[in-house]
Image: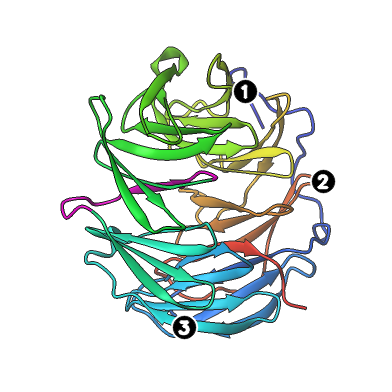
Amino acid sequence: MGDGNVPVGRDSTGPAAPGQPSPVAEALWVADESGVLRAFDGRTNEVSARVDIGRSAFPPVLGVGGGLVWVYRDDGGVVLVDPVTARVTRRAMVVPARPLADNRLSYAHRALWIAQPGRLWRVSTSGKVSSIQLPADFKATVAAATDRWLWLAGGRRLVRVDPEGQTVTVAGELPVDVEIGHLSDARSRLLAVGWNKSEIWVLDPDSGALESSIKIPDGELVMSVVSAGDDVWAMGNCGHAVRVTGTEHPQVHKVQVSNVSQDLGAAAAIGSLWVADEGRSELVRIDLQTAEVIARLPVTAADPDDPAFAVVAGQHSVWLIDTNLANGVLHVDPTTNRVLRLTSSIGVSLGVSAVVAPPPP
């Protein structure tokens, strides 16, 4: 399970024991291009609902917020689904930008926001569609919401959106040498990370001005950022998860996840950071308080020669999506640190989108 360089974890187990994970009142909602949204129920580990959302050429993008699951199809159809009743409540239309990668979705401030080059669309929970003009030459690549604003970043530029008045303020360019790759909020501060940079930029949450920077030890590049309460975890390119506590006087703590350079996918839930170590086909569990590796959970990947899986988490449950052609769904039991591959098929081969929301009754 480990070697001299990689911490094993005090509660690590061997091969998964038989049985089902403990029931949890959340569901993994999964969509592919078949036009059906499925709910994998955390109480039974079976598909408990199927909702017709309309076929699409590619898997739709999913979002969750405001008590709804949001579906954005490649033809521009926006489908609002109530996960509790497993019914479509509203349908709307936002013509997508081309290529499809130029559409950036985020739920914040009681609405779904779709950022496109030069324009920001807002879809309310009632299905009402409105839009805000952005600078003509601005293309958002990442977004983050603070308590007051919605922030968009593209290149080195920042744009601030007032979600109530639906007005836009151009904050200007950051005085940095690379484009903004990630945007996050933590401890009443806005955080940004540049592509191929080993530092986190701390920004004023109201003006977007650069206040300070936090260096990641040993020059490890930040591939992604996960917010967990008051802390931020930077996922490095050399196999480390780096916890950053505080912004004015930050404390930085590195945790070795793997001895293989890779893009570590991660999510925070149930008091832990869950990190996908695809090089070892393991899910690594790190305690958020102590920054200690609790366990390394074996993951039986669809392709054992090339494991690939993504972590999807809610408030009370953790799931894995096998991103190889089998597109399997796996459920994590945090009580016994076991991973169970669910037997139900999710269908086709072009991939899936998944979010965690309440299960149907």
The secondary structure type at the circle numbered 2 is: loop
Numbered tag placed on residue 336 in the rendering: 2
Please state, as top left, top right, bottom left or bottom right, where the C terminus lies in the image: bottom right
Q: Which residue is mark 1?
A: 3
Q: Earlier in the sequence, mark 2 or mark 3?
A: 3
Q: From which residue to which does the magenta span run?
A: 135-147
Toward which corner of the image does residue 158 lie, by quadrant?
Answer: top left
Q: Which residue is mark 3?
A: 91
Q: Earlier in the sequence, mark 3 or mark 1?
A: 1
Q: Is residue 268 above or below residue 246?
A: below
Binning the other alpha carbons within 10 Å of mark 2 as few (below 14), some (14 to 19) or many (20 upward) gives: some
Query: In the image, what residue occupies the spot 78% across and 64% down?
Result: 25
Residue type marked 3: Arg
Residue 328 visible in the displayed image: no
The secondary structure type at the circle numbered 3 is: strand
Q: Do callouts 3 and 1 mark residues in contact (Cβ within 8 Å)?
A: no
For this view, does 25 lie left or right of residue 236? right
